[in-house]
Image (cartoon, rainbow, N blue to C red):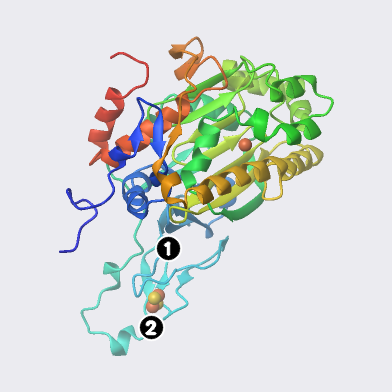
Amino acid sequence: MHAQPHDKGVSVTDINDLVDLDKGSLKGHMFTDEDIYQQELDKVWRRAWCFLAHDSMIPKKGDFLQNFIGEDPVLIVRQKDGSVKAFLNQCRHRGMRICRVDQGAAKAFTCSFHGWSYGLDGSLIQVPREGDAYPDDFDKANYPARPIPRLTNYKGFWFGTWDEEAPEFEEYLGSAKYYLDGYIDRWDGGMEPIAFHKWTLPNNWKFMAEQPTSDMQHSEITHVSAGQVLNKGSDAADRTLRGDNPTGRQFFSDYGHGGAWYGEKGSEVPNTGQAMQKWEAQPEIAEQIAKRLGDNREIRGHLNIWPTFMVLGNYTIRVTHPRGPGHQEIWAWTFVPKDADDATKDSIRRDVMRTFTPGGMFEGDDALNWEEMQEVLHGRIARDSGFTYQMTGAPIQWDEGPYPGGSTKHVFSDNAAINMYSNYVDMMNAENWDELKQLREKHRMGKSN
Ligand code: FES
Ligand SMILES: [Fe+2]
């Protein structure tokens, strides 16, 4: 009998055998196992809210962008009335990609296999030979491209989910909203992408997701040379990268989001380039920021909105798409304040290029770690031994001072990673969102209910 993805009792790998969060232990199989990966596509990627596009990527009617939710290709299209629709980029005829272009403007989409055509809203509008080779009762209305049922625009960023029962996006964000706003809701003129890089790496997507969620501590080792070169002359940055000043804070919240920043208010290390700091220091801009954000205006370091919407303090904003258990495809945009002058924008672009693009110094450091980890996991014995998450020395605080959600008053902590994996395990175990909500309540870290 053929097993269905939701069948219970079929012989697939059980995530609960691989994770022991009380002991801070994860088995390597969860980064290599094909069964686990197939469950992730169904239980994580199909149910989570995922980033699709920014308004400025599809400003005019007919503008479209191709993106992915997990491994499912999707098209996000600006409609004639200015609204946005998104649908699976799969032809209803024989399953070819409807649109093979990454981004552009269109009046309709014609499949390049047999020529079925779809409107901007995904409806099937033309079928070659419909008049003479199809039966009279063939009805195009039965074959629209499959729409993404839930879409939302959060401050210019479009997110979507296939799950009709998922909570509203802002509920999904929860306390991560406060921190995300600190990056994306600063300037009256909004933001826009000015550069875009895509690349693949031979490692599991969770290695990357974990990093902006939680792992700041690798910086003082992995990135020490790059940090010394790039921050020459900046005392604060140099001190922190050497580990003299690991203050700051780490945050995490219910649905697996997490982030961290240096300095109690992020002020001790220039997370953004100097050009951005100078531009933001202008009185009228500083006033905008203070008015829009209040306290959280200084909080910029690393942030991940689960599963993989990542924002770094120098304004690489990115996702990684899973490509099987051992590969990922990273899509990284460089965002800038729309109102900034050209020199500032270009400086931000060069700063990101130097640090967090395929040829960037930090990115190369990170890629090496992830690739090696995955390669080691090819070993039978290595796959069976556990990874350790025990850096939990700083106590967990909830809604401490101005900081909503769970947080730890130390930038170096595994708490946000443990929280991310706790949410991951709950998603893998829960049959639906109701059950997931209950599990998350039950497993809220360090909080007695
Ligand atoms: S697969 Fe698209 S028209 Fe045949
Ligand atoms: Fe890194």
Q: Name the spot of residue 166 as percent of width and height, x first.
A: 31, 39
Query: 120 or 205, which lies in front?
Result: 205
Identify which residue is drawn at 61% across, 54% down. Answer: 198
Identify which residue is drawn at 26% across, 51% down. Answer: 12
- What's the CA distance linking mark 2 and mark 1? 19 Å
Residue 143 located left or right of residue 2: right
Give residue 167's quadrant in the image. top left
SS assignment at label 1: loop
Q: Name the spot of residue 102 as percent of width and height, x first.
A: 56, 61
Q: Name the spot of residue 307 as percent of width and height, x first.
A: 44, 40
Q: Which residue is mark 2?
A: 128
Quadrant containing ligand 2:
top right
Is residue 156 in view from this perspective? Answer: no
Residue at the far front in the pictured view: 381
Q: Which mark is residue 89?
A: 1
Residue 338 located left or right of residue 168: right
Q: Name the spot of residue 316 as percent of width and height, x first.
A: 63, 41
Q: Is the CB atom of the residue marked by disc 2 within 8 angstroms of ligand 1's nearest atom?
A: yes
Question: Residue type at mark 1?
Answer: Asn
